[in-house]
Amino acid sequence: MARRPVTPVHEADPADEGDQIDLTPLAEIIGQKRPPASDLIPILQRVQSRYGYLPEPVIEEIARLTGIPASRIYGVVTFYAQFSTVPSGRHKVCVCQGTACHVRGGDEVLRAVRKDLSIAPGETTPDLDFTLDTVACLGACSFAPVMTVDGQYFGKMKGSRVGPILDESRSGSRGEGTA
Ligand code: FES
């Protein structure tokens, strides 16, 4: 699946980032022998699983260890939605903007989330607590408008419910779903 553009909220200096990231696990993840280029996607999956995302110094080191040009690796990373060059938040918030949700107040829900987190869709809060995204349908139209937090559904949403739901994530006190 092709990814849509993502806007990072904090742009790190790649030089500084390289100083902070331990690149030594990459040799073990990639292995002794140079892998074929067809192994690139599984390699990127393993590396992202280790680091949580694929920052520039990591991509450059993958290129050095595999012999695959960095430009090609960037091409794969930016094409597939499963890969990210920026860190994701600990909590993933997704607000449905599909037709059923739109006509029942999905815009109000998204506005409330944006206001609470002070970020736009595709962004992560500076404290790495939340990443916000929108989607065209969450498959629960009869509960519209719908949002999810870490995969948990919240249906028949109102803007006024957003703050308490996000506060539960902040405090880690959430119980069962309410969709
Ligand atoms: S349109 Fe929102 S859940 Fe289907």
Image (cartoon, rainbow, N blue to C red):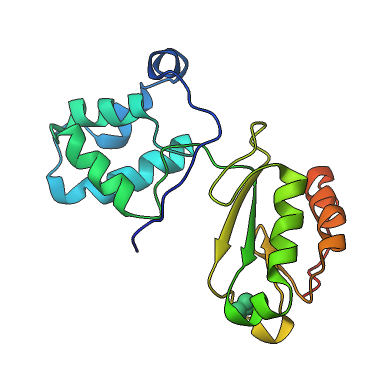
Residue 132 placement (x, y as % from top left)? 61, 51
Which residue: 64% across, 63% down? 95
Q: Does residue 119 show up? A: yes
The residue lying toward the viewer, choosing from 117 and 164, is 117
Q: Is residue 123 left or right of residue 17?
A: right
Q: Is residue 167 left or right of residue 89?
A: right
Residue 139 placement (x, y as % from top left)? 59, 80
**Which quadrant does the C terminus fall into?**
bottom right
**In the depicted structure, whether residue 165 falls above or below residue 16:** below
Which residue: 48% across, 26% down? 11
Q: Is residue 121 left or right of residue 150?
A: left
The residue lying toward the viewer, choosing from 89 and 52, is 89
Residue 1 placement (x, y as % from top left)? 35, 64
Please give the count of numbered marks on the rendered protein.
0
Q: Quadrant of residue 135?
A: bottom right
Residue 43 placement (x, y as % from top left)? 29, 44
**In the depicted structure, whether residue 84 falls above or below residue 19:** below
Q: In which quarter of the image is ligand 1?
A: bottom right
Which residue: 76% across, 75% down? 155
